[in-house]
Image: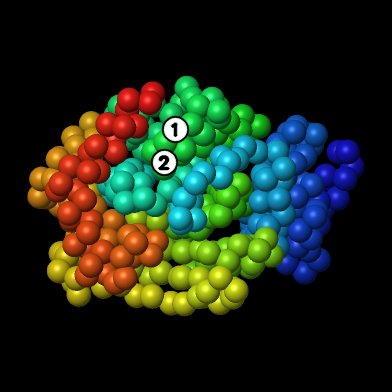
Amino acid sequence: MTNIFREFVQKVGSGNHTGENLTRAQAATATKMMLLGEATPAQIGAFLIAHRIKRPTGEELAGMLDAYDELGPKLQPIVSERPAMVLGIPYDGRTRTAPIIPVTALLLAAAGQPVVMHGGDRLPTKYGLPLIDIWQGLGVDWTALPLAKTQQVFAQTGIGFIYLPQHFPLTTSIWEYRDQLGKRPPLATMELIWCPYAGDAHVIAGFVHPPTEGMFQIALGLRGVTKFTFVKGLEGSCDLPRDRTAIIGLSASVTSQEIERLHLVPRDHGFTTKNVPLGTTEELVADIRDVLAGKPGELMQTALWNGGFYLWRSGICPNMPEALAKAEELLTSGVVAAKLEELQALQ
């Protein structure tokens, strides 16, 4: 088996003139061999850094997703009128701007839109604040829930969280390589569009560099995914920025892989152009609790901006003005706070 993997290293690591991309099937095999420890540590390290330098293709990302689908966990379909929104964010967290995704998830679920998140603990290369820590601060501990219990919580509340150390421990060794190499491997790009949900899904992914969006589009197209939203968001997440125009790619229709370009200007909707900086986790959790209590403030503005967009994108509201009003109503009426209490009670 190690000879097979050596061929993959040679293929991606031969430089600009003689290097080659992997096929979808080869990328799937390489990913499985890394996860299962069938390649040697030297081979895995060489492959990850060579592939990082080469840059992945959409076809290779599709193969990596195939491997994750084969070896990884999936939440099973729940009864819902809408596809579950699967929120893909960088696993290595946030260091500069306050994340709002937990509030967005609670708001969407309170409005009847199922949400699936996935991630782990503080991870390389940034070792930024992960979602799991924010949820714990809010009294929701996803880390100890076996998959069957997570499924139950998801079915009851409309919110699910695939916690990889518990639900997909094969990935742990790859994170160790990330730390030792000091660079994000191609798997870090693939994870943003991974969909650990077996039902009808709407893949939401953040990105930083424009070429990444094209890779996402090709990978999802090869895998038959027709509902997606790509956001040039805060620190590569799917949190919409307030300090600049939000650049967003939307799937045009259920039968097309074309991207419809959307530019959302915060000022046009009455929002000030500033992002909320990230302080301590405790400060962020306190600010989120204020948002859930309906108190005005900068983080409330971020919550409304994001909540409104995703209410519109889900189809719950027909346009942004109505969606922003709906987001404010949900947050100030206590309905979103009640969703958090429902989650806490199921722990």
Assess disc 1: are there few (<14), some (14-19) or many (≥20) residues with their C-alpha within 10 Å of its C-alpha: many
The answer to the question of whether label 1 and label 2 lie on touching residues, with beta carbons closer than 8 A, is: yes
Give the answer, above or below, for where 289 lies relative to 17.
above
- Return the x and y of residue 140 as percentages of the image width and height: 35, 29
Task: Give the Cα distance between marks 1 and 2.
Answer: 7 Å
Q: Give the residue type that dot 2 points to.
A: Ile
Assess disc 2: are there few (<14), some (14-19) or many (≥20) residues with their C-alpha within 10 Å of its C-alpha: many
**What secondary structure is marked by label 1?**
helix
* Residue 159 numbered mark, or none: 2
Q: Give the residue type that dot 1 points to.
A: Val
Looking at the image, which residue is at 47% across and 50% down?
80
In which quadrant is the C terminus drawn? top left
Give the quarter of the image for residue 224: bottom right
The one nearer the camera, 250 or 339, is 339
- Return the x and y of residue 105 as percentages of the image width and height: 35, 46
**What secondary structure is marked by label 2?**
strand
Looking at the image, how many numbered discs can be counted on the residues? Answer: 2
